[in-house]
Amino acid sequence: MLTVLLTARKISKHFDGTQALRDVDLEIEAGTVHALVGENGAGKSTLSKIIAGVVQPDSGELAWDGKPVVLRDPVEAQRLGVGIIFQELDVFPHLSVADNLTIGSLGAERGAFLNPRGMQSFCEPLLGEVGLRVPPGRLVSELSIAQMQLVLIARALGMNARLLIMDEPTSALSDDNAETLFRLIAQLKQKGVAILYVSHKMDEIFRLSDRITVLRDGAHIGTVLTSETDMNRIIAMMVGRDLDAGSGRAASTNQQVLLRVAGLSSRKLVNVNFQLHAGEVLGIAGLVGSGRSSLGAALFGLDPTVRGRIELRGLSYQPRSPGHAIDSGIGLLPEDRKTMGLMMQMSVQDNATISILDRLQSFGFLRTGAAHGQADEIHRRLRVKTAGADALISTLSGGNQQKVLLARWLLVNPEVMILDDPTRGIDIGAKYDIYQVIRDLSGAGKGVILISSELPELLQCCDRILVLHEGEQTGILDRAEATQERIMALATRTESLADPGH
């Protein structure tokens, strides 16, 4: 019989008038993977942070090995044996990889902070376990988002935790790196380590977990054995409503070319060629480092090294800056909403309307009522969960923050919308809300470029899929011929097309 490692009873927590958790119960057994699922705002991250000592509950109690405990801060939780990998990248970008692995870690030997050899011997095995081949002395700011995520996983492993909380650990990982993580989880289970696995990816949940606990609107809906349930039941418990599982749109037949790209090159791209038609959703696929995000940055004026010929609505377009791109009719939803998109100390309404302030002013004064009305309408459409338009954007869940950022672009209404991994870290219900927005944009004759690390998402949403490998275009597949296997073959350059597409 398995030993109950952690017990949570009647846990409640509220923030600024929002009830994040209401009398939630949870039991986690040693040597098991316990999945925690629910829509954004369901309370998953709040419960995880309470268990990790980051947030204090308003009421309820925790027990460890059957004994009551009070976790006043993360250090107390770490001493007890709790480690956590946060959904948002919790790194120190201006410090080295080694510094990030050892700082605050009780697993690092005393003196390792001042002894380069000691730091190296502590860090290298951890980096090897997660498959990250970078020197420990490299600055974290020089790493990709996926590599930063691997640093966080390595840091958690260095804590020698008995309970490891993983909040969306694969949200920025390639398939290869995700497989490395899954093997690590299996090894940790064999050692008796418990994993609390928070994810929106149902295939991962059913592959890895032994039990699944579902939260909805801060309440505990139920806990079930993974082997005794199925995906439809879990989704129904999560969202409390039916979802349209299909793409819901016919393939675009509009031949009007909105965007024409020929010989596009930059520091990371080599001779990329494609056309984007009105009403079309063009997917961009590729492994980490393939240049997916670089393509969006090039078209949006974020990369000054861009070369080649670009036409927008038949006119020459040379992106000079993001402001020029917006004025020309191009929008970009960035990959990292926290550092590249949102103003975290501003309100929900201000974040949504900041790009259309010129429309909301009279004689230099903001028409507050108009701004409030614009924000309210778009938030209802996207099902944004917030205590109010004046609430700080930082108080929202990651998925609702993403919806507010998308709302900003819907208000701008560009002709070409570039979405860079728009559903990263987003729950099932929110994903389908965003898929509906993509359908609406294409149905209105907009051109959509969907950059995604999830192949099922690309296959579901796109008319064509352009595949990149190390900055080079290896093919463009029509919807009828696109499969996960063929996309991966092109992404790894194990298959080549005679004509990569234009």
Image (spheres, rainbow, N blue to C red):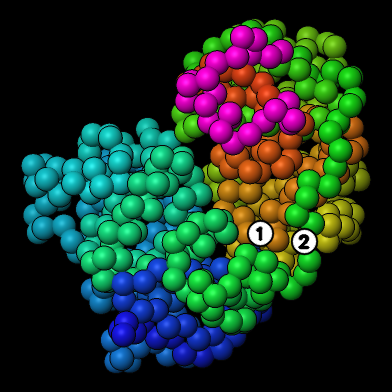
SS of the residue under disc 2: loop
Q: Which residues are magenta?
A: 478-502
Q: Residue type at mark 2?
A: Leu
Mark 2 vs 1: CB contact within 8 A: yes
In this view, 219 is above or below 244: below
Residue 142, image x and y in percent?
37, 33
Q: Earlier in the sequence, mark 2 or mark 1?
A: 2
Of the numbered discs in the image, which one, if any, rests on residue 243? 2
In this view, 110 is above or below 213: above
In this view, 31 is above or below 117: below
Q: Quadrant of residue 157?
A: bottom left
Of the numbered discs in the image, which one, if any, rests on residue 428? 1
SS of the residue under disc 1: helix
Q: Quadrant of the C terminus?
A: top right
Residue 260, image x and y in percent?
76, 14
| Residue 58 appears in view | no
Q: CA distance from mark 2 to mark 1?
A: 9 Å
| Residue 270 appears in view | yes
- Looking at this view, is 25 or 94 the one in front? 25
Q: Is residue 469 magenta?
A: no
Q: Residue type at mark 1?
A: Ile
Q: Is residue 485 magenta?
A: yes
Identify the residue at image location x=59%, y=36%: 484
Q: Is residue 158 left or right of residue 54?
A: left
In this view, 458 is above or below 187: above
